[in-house]
Image: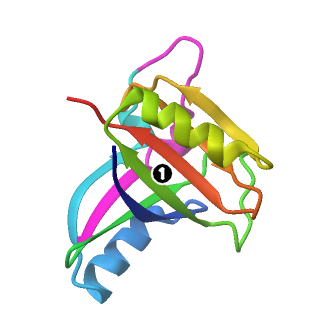
């Protein structure tokens, strides 16, 4: 079942500043903030020191709405106009696969569905209209 969709802002290194800005400007409550430095250590992927304070994921509550924010990882493309995405929260792995496949028809997988440290199945896809989606499975 799809639990909901949320706007997701992708910034280019000023995510912490944006969190503070929206917290003040929109009376947002910061529900959580993780940096790239908070990621589990991995021998296949090291996080450079200059990136550790960038926002991996922030969750702000504004009234009844959730706003998500993250920074790009250096070297990833950042383009004004594609910096607002839509995050879909789904509570079933099979439903996540179905939604991802349907959104990918005529579009393009950016990050294939895979297990991450925060989700048993997460992926990113751009649909045939150029809309960027993040599919995140939350079970349990």
Q: Residues within 10 Å of mark 1 (few under 14, many from 20)?
A: many
x and y percentages locating residue 116 in the rendered image: 45, 26
Q: Residue furthest top?
A: 43
- Mark 1: secondary structure: loop
The question of residue 60 being in magenta is answered with yes
Colour pattern of the rendering: rainbow
Q: Name which quarter of the figure residue 112 lies in.
A: top right
In the rendered image, the vertical position of residue 44 relative to residue 137, given as above or below: above
Query: Which image quarter is the C terminus in?
Result: top left
Q: Name which quarter of the figure residue 91 lies in.
A: top left
- Nearer to me, 23 or 14: 23
In the rendered image, the vertical position of residue 137 relative to residue 108, given as above or below: above
Query: Which image quarter is the N terminus in?
Result: top left
Q: Name which quarter of the figure residue 99 lies in.
A: top right
x and y percentages locating residue 33 in the rendered image: 30, 52
Residue at the (77%, 57%) spot, across then down = 128
Residue at the (71%, 54%) spot, across then down = 127
Q: Residue furthest bottom?
A: 25
x and y percentages locating residue 67 in the rendered image: 36, 67
Residue at the (61%, 45%) spot, across then down = 73
The residue labelled by disc 1 is 54
Q: Is residue 59 left or right of residue 68?
A: left
The question of residue 84 being in magenta is answered with no
- Nearer to me, 123 or 81: 123
x and y percentages locating residue 20 in the rendered image: 32, 73
Residue at the (71%, 47%) spot, across then down = 76
Magenta residues?
41-61
Q: Is residue 96 left or right of residue 25?
A: right
Q: Is residue 116 left or right of residue 101?
A: left
- Nearer to me, 38 or 64: 64
């Amino acid at each position: 079942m799809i639990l909901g969709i949320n706007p997701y802002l992708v910034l280019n290194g000023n995510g912490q500043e944006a969190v503070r800005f929206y917290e003040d400007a929109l009376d947002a409550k910061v529900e959580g903030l993780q940096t790239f430095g908070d990621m589990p250590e991995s021998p296949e992927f090291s996080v450079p020191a200059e990136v550790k304070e960038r926002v991996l994921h922030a969750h702000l509550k504004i009234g009844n709405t959730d706003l998500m924010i993250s920074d790009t990882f250096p070297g990833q493309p950042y383009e004004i106009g594609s910096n607002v995405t839509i995050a879909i929260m789904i509570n079933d792995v099979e439903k996540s696969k179905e939604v991802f496949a349907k959104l990918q028809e005529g579009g393009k997988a950016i990050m294939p569905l895979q297990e991450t440290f925060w989700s048993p199945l997460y992926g990113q896809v751009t649909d045939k209209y150029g809309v960027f989606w993040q599919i995140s499975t939350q079970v349990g």
